[in-house]
Amino acid sequence: MAMRMSTLFLRTLREDPADAELPGHKLLVRAGYIRRVAPGVYTWLPLGLRVLQKVEGVVREEMNRIGAQEVRLPALLPREPYEATGRWTEYGEALFRLQDRKGSDMLLGPTHEEIFCLTVKDMYSSYKDLPLSLYQIQTKYRDEARPRAGLLRGREFIMKDSYSFDVDQAGLQKSYDAHREAYVRIFDRLGFEYVIVHADSGAMGGSASEEFLAVSEFGEDTFVRDEHGYAANVEAVQVPQAAEVDASAVPAAQVHDTPDTPTIDTLVARLNEAHPREDGRAWTAADTLKNVLVMLHQPDGTREPLAVGVPGDREVDPKRLEAQVAPAEPEPFTDEDFAAFPALAKGYIGPGALGEDKPAGIRYLLDPSIAVGSEWVTGADERGKHVLHLVHGRDFTADGTIQAAQIREGDPSPDGHGSLTLARGMEMGHIFQLGTKYAEALGLKVLDENGKLVTVTMGSYGVGVSRSVAAVAEGNRDEAGLVWPRAFAPADVHLVATGKDEAVFVAAEEIVSGLEAQDLTVLYDDRRKVSPGVKFKDAELIGVPTIVVVGKGLADGKIEIKDRRSGDRREVPVEDAVAEVLREVRG
Amino acid sequence: MAMRMSTLFLRTLREDPADAELPGHKLLVRAGYIRRVAPGVYTWLPLGLRVLQKVEGVVREEMNRIGAQEVRLPALLPREPYEATGRWTEYGEALFRLQDRKGSDMLLGPTHEEIFCLTVKDMYSSYKDLPLSLYQIQTKYRDEARPRAGLLRGREFIMKDSYSFDVDQAGLQKSYDAHREAYVRIFDRLGFEYVIVHADSGAMGGSASEEFLAVSEFGEDTFVRDEHGYAANVEAVQVPQAAEVDASAVPAAQVHDTPDTPTIDTLVARLNEAHPREDGRAWTAADTLKNVLVMLHQPDGTREPLAVGVPGDREVDPKRLEAQVAPAEPEPFTDEDFAAFPALAKGYIGPGALGEDKPAGIRYLLDPSIAVGSEWVTGADERGKHVLHLVHGRDFTADGTIQAAQIREGDPSPDGHGSLTLARGMEMGHIFQLGTKYAEALGLKVLDENGKLVTVTMGSYGVGVSRSVAAVAEGNRDEAGLVWPRAFAPADVHLVATGKDEAVFVAAEEIVSGLEAQDLTVLYDDRRKVSPGVKFKDAELIGVPTIVVVGKGLADGKIEIKDRRSGDRREVPVEDAVAEVLREVRG
């Protein structure tokens, strides 16, 4: 197959598109692979579609290999099943909702647990029918708040989603493991650096889940790993509960005037100045207990305040907090909110006011690093006053703990046997053990061996297919353009014919035919009025792995073969062109 | 490749689904190819998806053959371009509209002229870039009022749509002809009976257009054809203007009392009784002029009355009328409407009241069969009165003509050289010469040879891909089930192993492996606890063209090969099984 650049629907751009943020994405636009139609909504141009279809092919192969069966569900879905599982509401603004001409509520599927569940319910009724794994490669919709990152955060995007159905947890574990192995093979083949991290199940529900992250400084996710192989999304890091410490030597709590100390920094300065410690150690932010108020917005529109207590040297991590309170969305506590809770002294809030049974009546959760027996300086619930020597468990308690404090480079691993480093990644795959949440809500039961109805146990597994194209592009590029791995390049060979000599084009055509006869796909730059410089630049930008140049050297019976990645080039006799290119391509 | 029925996601049904109307559609549901999720919205199960992908493959091959380039545009689209061409409004309720989280209006693409136009505008600027043909195979959305006909009238459906771009009409004609030839090849390969008919361009705009209809009694479209090869959708039939006739001998118009004759039948009876003709010929409905009132509902919400005059022996054909007044929708004239126009005497309406310059002020259009000089009996605009000898052109005129009267079996062909027969069909493909309508509205211009900006001329071409699966099923079935043509069958061979003898399954597995080694796809019924009768029934229902039975005969070293279509069966030695099946499959 040959694509001729004289007719190919392609225009390369010299300038970066204004709306693109990521370098790989900029190159995909500049090289004519994709084009934006609306925020987060893209067109796949001929070269882009070829790459996309190759990625789809790899995903399909690996899903078929584990015995998953391909189906295709609609994207336009009725409200009722999503209502039954609560997701019609829980998805909040991320769900594209619409009404048909009869006024029936419909949605554009963001993920299809409900409909797969109903399809299986409709067809299967016995444990003998299971296990079952189904998948689809399909266009999905999510109304992202910030669709900036190009294909990485599309509002219309292509996903492979699969679902497993088993009678029990042991079966689910097997299906999950099979998917995990398939995903490892998929991402190994895609060829970008990735890491498998423990993940938070979020709004999906369910128990165990892991994410496949492409490692990239441009990633939107932060993950941690340690030297022993532990890796987790920050949202999923479980900071262990600190062991109780002996507080018998701690003096009784004392309230002190600390005027004008509404921030941790001003408080620490004041403490060191006015209340130096007996042992001479300086007060630091780590000695203080910071109580952060947020307002939770529930999907049903109701609002509920929450107080989070963390050591003063750490922030509350918005993503960790979000994951903990989902599907509610935390919003900053406004002055209006403060006005509604007069027991709260803004800037001086302490455990005295917090907790469901305390004056403000606000649920109060502590970071698990705050040990029972540990002593703190914290707000005294009165403007300009703090309390010293306040001991957790002696002088105050909370309603529970929450995994919401910032994780920092060098923090101990949750198992205590290592220390964490932080990095960024892009979510490419996510596997979930859903358990019975969806099957329960939608009544998917089968008869077991004893003729008893049991609720089916589900798993859910996704690969971002259009995202993967973006990740391959991010991971395979240089200054001059894209550098596709062979398996995903839009063509096997980019043949550039240069100059005005008719003999060049005759020879080039012959080589194209020879390569086509070998089943190679050739991108042939047959443009007559374009300079060699522009053609070479386009070839670098487009990034086909093997570039063949038929030009001046032809007078001496030579053509040039260039490796896009290494830049290595060599001349070969024109009569060996096809054989030499084949050697490059097939190795 | 083998699909084992013990694990294949498939349940055949003995009963017809309640919501299905067409026999082929019922079979697709019963045989486990598709399943309804919502009205007009379907899931493709494993067998169905295989057929769909094969149809897609044929369409893709033929589009590539004419040099059309594949791309993929989004389905979720911004309002603005559709606003610019007027289709945001014109599509009426058939358009799925929605808003994103920021309140921006969006739509689900029913067809993509606008976005293709903008994509080309964005990339091309010179006549040298043209001609260009682009296509996509994509999911589309239309909120059909009556999504009853299964896949034939889906609200979410798969279409191949392509668009051609040329500098002039000669170029468009070439692109159109190339598409037409590609469509002939596609529908020849799909193998159902089809006819190419002149079509109405409808809301699409543009000049020439043709439809490819699958001939079927269940079709929603009516078409005509004559013995000389003329064929047209009824909406597109152009009844020629009848030649003027000599009215010099017609007496002056006379108003007569015709009490209680609000219908054509009662009027004709009254005429024959009270006003016999001098020459003894009986009055018939064809001597009367019927004036039908409708209210046009414009997409912008405004309403406008219209009167249509047709010979009394013909009805106004709702589909022909709709096509003529699109994008307005004609609705029946209500009593309330009559009340608003007191000049109209319901049941006795004549040309005296009709016309933009007449008392009622209603636009009045005549069927072109009504010749100037022809005489009519028609309402006298007074309750219980009709007028005789009313001559068109002498006693009344209208505001114009309209192609809205019923076409009947035996009517003359528009060219006068044949007579029409009527039949029904299902629209499978539609090709349009759009001209400059879209390019004009969206500013798609290129520089021509002389450096002058010219508006690009477009064509638009669609194939209903999911519809085609339905049409293949409608055209290939019998009492027992589906009878797939080889090219679209979900498998090459359906191998049925029967009985409890382990040797049968061992032999069957060997044959499966042998067929797989020959690159055949086998649907293997390896179920152990299902009776031979059920297995045979399932095989007939599913409709794979070659059925192989490994069962009782194996004791004598024989297996059976059955042709699903002809029912022919023959026994062959088990050791020849693979070779004999190959002969069947590859011919």
Image: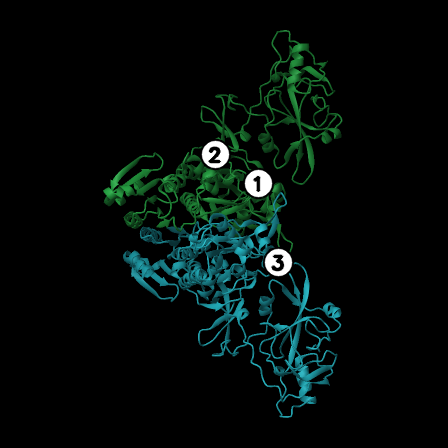
Chain colours: A green, B cyan
**Chain letter for the residue marked with disc 1 in the picture:** A
The Cα atoms of the two marked residues, 2 and 3, are separated by 44 Å
Give amino acid for label 3.
Answer: Gly
Q: Residue at x 50, y 50 (%)?
A: B121
Q: Are marks 2 and 1 in contact (CB under 8 Å)?
A: no
What secondary structure is found at the residue carrying circle 2? strand
Q: Tag 3's secondary structure?
A: helix
Q: Which residue is mark 1?
A: A144
Chain of the residue under the numbered disc 3 shown in the image = B
Residue A65 % position (x, y): 40, 44
Q: CA distance from mark 2 to mark 1?
A: 19 Å
Numbered label attached to residue B455: none
Corner quadrant of residue A360: top right
Q: Amino acid at mark 2?
A: Leu
Q: Circle 1 — which element?
A: loop
The location of residue B537, given as percent across then percent down, is 44, 61
Q: Where's residue A370, x and y in %?
A: 61, 20
Point out the image quarter for the C terminus of chain A. Answer: top left
The subunit carrying tag 2 is: A
Indicate which disc residue B92 carries: 3
Q: Residue at x 46, y 73 (%)?
A: B230
Marks 2 and 3: which is nearer the front? Answer: 3
